[in-house]
Image (cartoon, grey):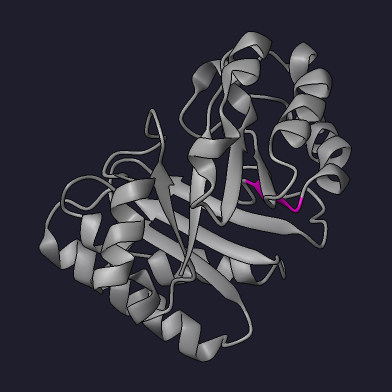
Amino acid sequence: MKIVVPIMPKSLEAIARLSSDQYQGADLIEWRADFLAISDLDLAASKIKDKFPDHPIIFTFRTEDKDEQLLSDADYARLIDKFASEFAYIDIEVLRFPEISLPKNAIASYHDFDQIPENLADILGKMQARHPKVVKFAGMPQDKKDVIRLMSETLTFSEVHPDQIIVTMAMGELGKVTRLVGDSFGSSWTFAAVDATSAPGQLSLTEMRQLQHIL
């Protein structure tokens, strides 16, 4: 199971202060570009790529949890079109922006910060129907049954679509187990943190690597 480590610099100066040595144990870097002003993204993209020349990088501009970042469909599409060719993967909120064209390196993603939806199978199916490189879902469980249901739905999906990369996780303390043993039920990546976490329940990169050796 690959480990993705998000970076969330809030300024160009913060990018300069990043130490790539801290991320050597990561398989991929996710750049959360939504923490920067859009006007800074061109220069920031160049600096991020220079900082992590040996890592595949995911470009993510998250709007689902940020009302202030709600872009028009046209503006979001332009953002995706501009940066898709510059990075190994590009995260796209396909259910929020259903008309957008998906490049070959698209991660079709959906996040629910309140629940693990009862129609999770339908959500995964809708994303997979767009033929992305990766299908990704993260949700907030309310009880242990939600966690088990997420794992079960992920396993079923991975068996029905064996050639599709799928990444799922349950957030928060309840969901930590899904970050540790995701590959046991079909999930291909997990997310870990070096400094600030990008989602509730993330473990540190050091902890993830140690636990992988144990498990």
- Chief secondary structure of the magenta portion: strand
Quadrant location, the C terminus: bottom left
Residue shown at 57% from the left, 24% from the top:
18
Q: Is residue 133 visible?
A: yes
In the image, residue 56 above or below residue 177: above
Residue shown at 32% from the left, 67% from the top:
212
Residue shown at 52% from the left, 89% from the top:
160
Horizontal relation, residue 153 to residue 77: left or right: left
Q: Nearer the viewer, residue 174 or 64?
A: 174
Q: Quadrant of residue 113?
A: top left
Count of numbered labels shown in the rendering = 0
- Residue 153 percent location from the top left of the image: 36, 76
Q: Is residue 117 visible?
A: no
Residue shown at 36% from the left, 38% from the top:
199
- Residue 92 percent location from the top left of the image: 66, 47
Horizontal relation, residue 102 to residue 93: left or right: right
Residue 184 part of the magenta-drawn span: no
Write the start and end of the magenta stretch as one range: 88-92
- Residue 143 percent location from the top left of the image: 12, 56
